[in-house]
């Protein structure tokens, strides 16, 4: 089974071992960005195993430096291919999909099925689905404005 997952994260920040694997890239991104004058993003592949994992997996690190400072991100995967493409096309697309689901549930009340009868709940979901179609159409039409 192919997967992309996030490595364990400490409550106070990223895993120090992961930060160490990306430290040179973060410093290079900082220098190239002229201390945040513009955004620079670099990617690095590496092997990583958390303390409880039986074997190491492929890690992909994104070293980014922006006006806000350092912005490192990490994923682990068993997928083949270019690390930057996997990060941008699969991982980021997954996050975008989750945001669209959250938009529908929160903004269009798709999760509100509080009635005890089936038909009123079904009607609410149908109205929410129609609103979603309109919402997506408008978002597509206005994306370059």
Image (spheres, rainbow, N blue to C red):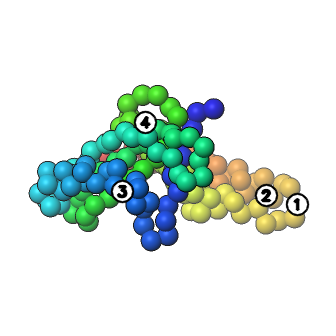
Q: Earlier in the sequence, mark 3 or mark 4?
A: 3
Q: Secondary structure at mark 2?
A: helix
Task: Say whether residue 19 is visible.
Answer: yes
CA separation in Å, label 1 and label 2: 7 Å
User: Looking at the picture, how far across and down is residue 68, in whole percent?
Assistant: 26, 65
Which residue: 56% across, 62% down?
107
Distance from Cα at disc 4 to Cα at disc 2: 39 Å
How far from the left and from the top, in percent, is residue 127?
A: 67, 53
Residue 91 visible from this viewpoint: no
Q: Who comes first in sequence, dot 4 or dot 2?
A: 4
User: Separation of disc 4 and disc 1 at Cα?
Assistant: 44 Å
| Callout 3 crowding tier (Cα within 10 Å): few <14, some 14–19, many ≥20 | some
Q: Residue at x 31, y 42 (%)?
A: 43
Residue 40, numbered label:
none
Q: Give the answer, above or below, for where 92 lies relative to 102.
A: above
- Please give the residue where the numbered disc 2 appears in the rendered image: 121
Image x and y of residue 52, in percent: 60, 52
Contact between labelled residues 2 and 3, with CB atoms less than 8 Å apart:
no
**Element marked by disc 4:** helix
Q: Nearer the viewer, mark 3 or mark 2?
A: 3
Name the residue that disc number 4 marks: 86
* Mark 3 → mark 4, Cα distance in angstroms: 20 Å
């Amino acid at each position: 089974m192919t997967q992309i997952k996030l490595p364990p994260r400490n409550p106070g920040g990223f895993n120090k071992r992961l930060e160490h694997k990306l430290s040179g890239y973060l410093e290079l991104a900082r220098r190239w960005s002229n201390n945040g004058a513009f955004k620079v993003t670099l990617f690095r592949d590496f092997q990583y195993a958390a303390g409880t994992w039986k074997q190491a997996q492929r890690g992909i690190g994104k070293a980014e430096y922006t006006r806000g400072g350092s912005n490192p991100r990490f994923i682990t995967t068993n997928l083949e291919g270019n690390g930057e493409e996997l990060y941008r096309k699969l991982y980021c697309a997954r996050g975008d999909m989750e945001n669209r689901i959250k938009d529908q549930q929160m903004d269009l009340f798709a999760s509100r099925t509080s009635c005890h009868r089936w038909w009123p709940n079904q009607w609410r979901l149908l109205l929410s689905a129609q609103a979603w179609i309109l919402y997506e159409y408008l978002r597509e039409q206005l994306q370059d404005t």
